[in-house]
Image (cartoon, rainbow, N blue to C red):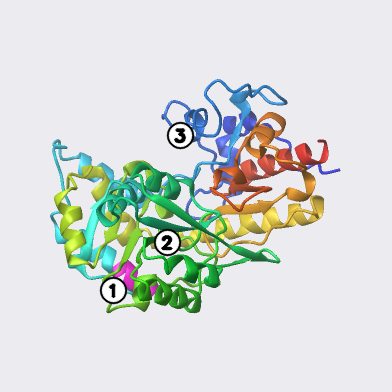
Amino acid sequence: MFIGFVLPIRTIIAYPNFLKQMSTNNYQFDQVIKREGTNAMSLTGYRGYLFDVDEDLNGNYEEADFIPMWVADMEFAIAPEIINAMKKRLEHPLLGYSRVADPTYSLVFQQWCLDRYGWKPELAHLVNAKGVIPALYDLIGHICKPGDKVLIITPSYAFFKHSVDFNDRTLVCSDLLEVDGTFYMDMEDIRQKTADEKCVLGIFCNPHNPTGKAWSKKELQELGEVCLKNDVMIISDEIHCDLLRKDISFTPMASLFPDSDQIITCMAPSKTFNLAGNMFANIVIPNDALRKTYSENYLPVENPLSIVAAQAAYSEGHAWLLELTDYLDANFKYLKTVLDTHLPQAKFVIPDATYLAWVNVNAYFSGNENLTLFFARNSGVLLEGGDMFVANAKGYIRLNLACPRIRLEEGVRRIVKAILEK
């Protein structure tokens, strides 16, 4: 029987000094931070998204004791360098309409891409957005005519589908292939579907959400060649690109096709630096006509604090990200050890990237059980079951591991206990 760490979450929160003593890093990733009273989605947004608003969640735990491991933001304090930059901006007493007018920000973002990935996006191609998903909603409407088709790879982040549905375009799915926990694109299927003249756009995720696969140069080259040959424009969502395991490298798709203007790149500091609430993203659109259309239909007003936070992240956040990488790597290793020991029939391979674990627990369930609801009621853990990722995800759960180890231990203990006692 799995015992694990049993200190209640309320007790953990009550003793921050204990947590500080656990950490030997310069940044306090072990610190458990209360989010009550901050309008945090993780605590206030799960009804109406994970469940119906009036869903009965009564079970082994009260909702006040639920552990959120669902929405993709982190339970870590952002880098103090970023907070200090925001505080300094607040010393100026005016927070009026603002836009990215100073070229310093664009240069800092460009240098970040060059230093980390050897890719130097053209400054003239860079526009901003209130987030990658808002940009997707806009771009699909600009690119696709009524009756056009949009290809995605499944399982998929649900908002890829939602953005296509919102624009009343036709969704086409290509299922990933899985071999021993490693995922591959079905290139023959993609060839067939992109050959359809109605298919004019592909939305791809690199690194992939939810599997965490960082596609190799060879895979990206083949995918890009197939799409471009069939006049399929590509939106490459690369929002998780900075969150790599220590031994993994990342390649921006656009870097492999420098002469093409048919690949749009979406990046943001939001996942990397826990700035999702700032609603600020970088969209690289090399196609002049599309960029002009996008800009004409975009209100270029940004939160002044978002601008300085993003600039500070890219210019001063390297050390924080390095320690975060170490911490996340250790969290993934912990989860892998627990699952191998106590749930040997679960299938889990540590992903190349992201802070999201994609775990196949199908062997422990029969039928079409709602895993999101099962774990809420039986483990008091909020997570996302495979049915929330469009298709090709039966029996999977997605767990957010970007949390202090003490909370991860309790969440995993509850999940294992709920499965073994079902």
Q: Residue at x 86, y 43 (%)?
A: 1
Judged by depth in the image, the label closer to the viewer, 2 or 3, is 3
Q: Is residue 82 in sight in this rendering?
A: yes
Q: 10 Å neighbourhood of mark 1: few (<14), some, or many (≥20)? A: some
How far is the residue under mark 1 from the one under mark 2? 22 Å
Q: Quadrant of the C terminus?
A: top right
Instruction: Judge whether 244 appears above or below 88 on screen.
Output: below
Residue drawn at x 17%, y 66% is: 288
Over which residues does the magenta segment extend?
Answer: 111-118
Mark 3: secondary structure? helix
Q: Nearer the viewer, residue 263 or 233?
A: 233
Kind of residue at badge 2: Ala
- According to the picture, the residue beneath numbered tag 3 turns out to be 41
Q: Is residue 116 above or below residue 361?
A: below
C-alpha separation, residue under disc 2 versus residue under disc 3: 28 Å
Badge number at residue 163: none
Q: Mark on residue 319? A: 2
Residue type beneath disc 1 = Lys
Label 2 or label 3, whichever comes before in sequence order: 3
| Disc 1 + disc 2, Cβ < 8 Å | no
